[in-house]
């Protein structure tokens, strides 16, 4: 594939031509104050539209969310959180914030200002059916000569359950043991883990992070420089790991590096399988994701003369699709917000709003707010059951 000749016909990583994605919306205003979510039914990422998952203290000193105070952002694979945040570094320097945010059918795209002669964008999405979030970083060398640079992905873990909360007994903070980080050379991945807690009848938790070059890129030099483990700067019990790569990019050409963040509350094998599948064919998974969201749009159609109202109706359907969760290995009990701990229930279906860092109070198929639902949560895991949350 000759990137120099094909650039005009190649869109940014994950970008869909506007004629094929009429609902694509974009903004360049106050990105550091607006949240976004890129969600699948097994995993999602919540952050700010400038690309950060941890807000500036001056703008939001309490972080994202109040159930687990300040910790509802980042990457989740319910019923656990995987990462508090991730960041990209170019030649050892943190990439600047995005200057444009684009939301499409099942994906988001962040467009960054040119840096060191490179045009950069990120496409983020979570394929349905897999506990993984995929981030495609497209790098375009706008100069005629070869660009040689290092690209690093730094991840800070936060392996905590969605329940208990900050205001329950016990609190979320009191149960968070220090995370452990290492490098799995077989997977080429950072491995974050939280040890088993037999007292609470649950096994170990895992988050894996790795990267792969777009399989269509045959002429780009891409070499792993290994992993490092800088100290964690947050006040929580997470751990930090960095994957670094040497990239040589021909003049007037582009390449896409895909990063995967996978996790599991069941076992490492599930996280490993999701990581491997995600990096094997990210473009195919993205096309499948968009196709699935387009099928959602084809349902319950109405036609109204006002384009804004029409778009709002369609986006409402997409937002409801983002609220679907499939959770494995969970127990449900009515704890009365952390005051009692009866024997777990084993229902075949249980409605619950997904704790995605947003203030969601209604569920598809239910006409009234689910006022009493928040007292039901998964506390301990490990019963081998599968729960569909809608």
Image (cartoon, grey):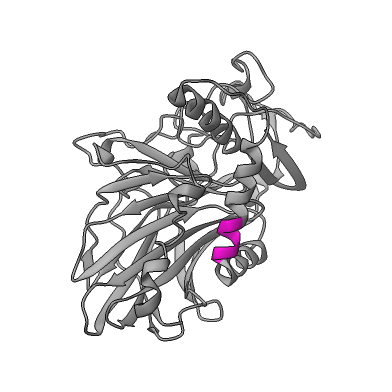
Main secondary structure type of the part rendered in magenta: helix
The percent position of residue 249, horizontal first and vertical second, equals 31, 81
Q: Is residue 285 magenta?
A: yes
Relative vertical location of residue 292 with respect to residue 277 in this rendering, above or below: above
Seen at 34% across and 52% down, the residue is 110
Based on the displayed image, in which of its 4 quarters is residue 156 positioned? bottom left
- Total of numbered circles in the picture? 0
* Image point (33%, 43%), residue name: 49
Quadrant in the picture for the C terminus: top right
Q: Would you say 295 lies left or right of 68 here?
A: right
- Residue 137 is inside the magenta segment: no
Q: Quadrant of residue 46?
A: top left
Image x and y of residue 43, in percent:
56, 49
Q: Which residues are magenta?
A: 282-287
Q: Residue at x 51, y 81 (%)?
A: 185
Q: Is residue 128 visible?
A: yes
Left or right of 264 on screen, residue 88 = left
Is residue 285 shown above or below 42?
below
Q: Is residue 268 above or below residue 127?
A: below
Q: Position of residue 48 (x, y in %)?
A: 34, 42
Residue 193 visible at all: no
Image coordinates for residue 181, horizontal then vertical, percent: 45, 66
Q: Nearer the viewer, residue 326 or 307?
A: 307
User: In the rendered view, does 157 fall on the left or right side of 351?
Assistant: left
> Which is more toward the observer, 75 or 336?
75
């Amino acid at each position: 594939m000759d990137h120099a000749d094909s650039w005009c016909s190649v869109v940014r990583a994950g970008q869909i031509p506007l004629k094929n994605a009429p609902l694509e919306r974009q903004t360049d205003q106050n990105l550091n104050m607006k949240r976004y979510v890129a969600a699948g039914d097994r995993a999602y990422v919540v952050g700010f539209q400038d690309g950060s998952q941890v807000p500036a203290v001056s703008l939001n000193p309490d972080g994202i969310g109040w159930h687990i105070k300040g910790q509802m952002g980042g990457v989740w694979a319910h019923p656990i959180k995987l990462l508090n945040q991730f960041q990209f570094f170019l030649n050892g320097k943190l990439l600047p914030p995005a200057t444009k945010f684009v939301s499409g059918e099942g994906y988001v795209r962040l467009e960054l200002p040119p840096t060191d002669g490179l045009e950069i964008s990120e496409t983020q999405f979570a394929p349905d059916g897999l506990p993984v979030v995929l981030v495609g970083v497209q790098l375009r060398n706008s100069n005629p000569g070869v660009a040689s640079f290092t690209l690093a992905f730094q991840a800070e873990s936060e392996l905590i359950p969605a329940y208990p909360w900050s205001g329950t007994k016990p609190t979320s903070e009191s149960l968070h043991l220090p995370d452990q980080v290492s490098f799995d050379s077989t997977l080429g991945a950072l491995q974050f883990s939280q040890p088993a807690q037999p007292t609470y009848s649950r096994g170990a938790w895992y988050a894996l992070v790795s990267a792969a070059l777009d399989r269509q890129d045959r002429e780009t030099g891409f070499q792993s420089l290994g992993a490092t483990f800088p100290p964690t700067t947050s006040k929580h019990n997470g751990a930090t790991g960095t994957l670094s790569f040497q990239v040589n990019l021909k003049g007037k050409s582009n390449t896409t590096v895909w990063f995967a963040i996978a996790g599991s509350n069941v076992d490492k094998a599930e996280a490993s399988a999701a990581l491997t599948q995600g990096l094997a064919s990210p473009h195919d998974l993205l096309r499948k994701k968009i196709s699935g969201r387009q099928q959602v749009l084809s349902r319950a159609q109405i036609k109204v003369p006002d384009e804004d109202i029409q778009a709002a109706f369609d986006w409402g359907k997409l937002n409801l699709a983002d609220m679907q969760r499939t959770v494995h290995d969970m127990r449900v009990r009515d704890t009365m917000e952390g005051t009692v701990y009866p024997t777990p229930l084993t229902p075949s279906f249980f409605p619950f709003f997904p704790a995605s860092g947003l203030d969601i109070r209604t569920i598809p198929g239910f006409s009234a707010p689910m006022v009493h639902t928040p007292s039901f949560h998964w506390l301990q895991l490990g019963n081998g059951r599968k729960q569909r949350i809608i």
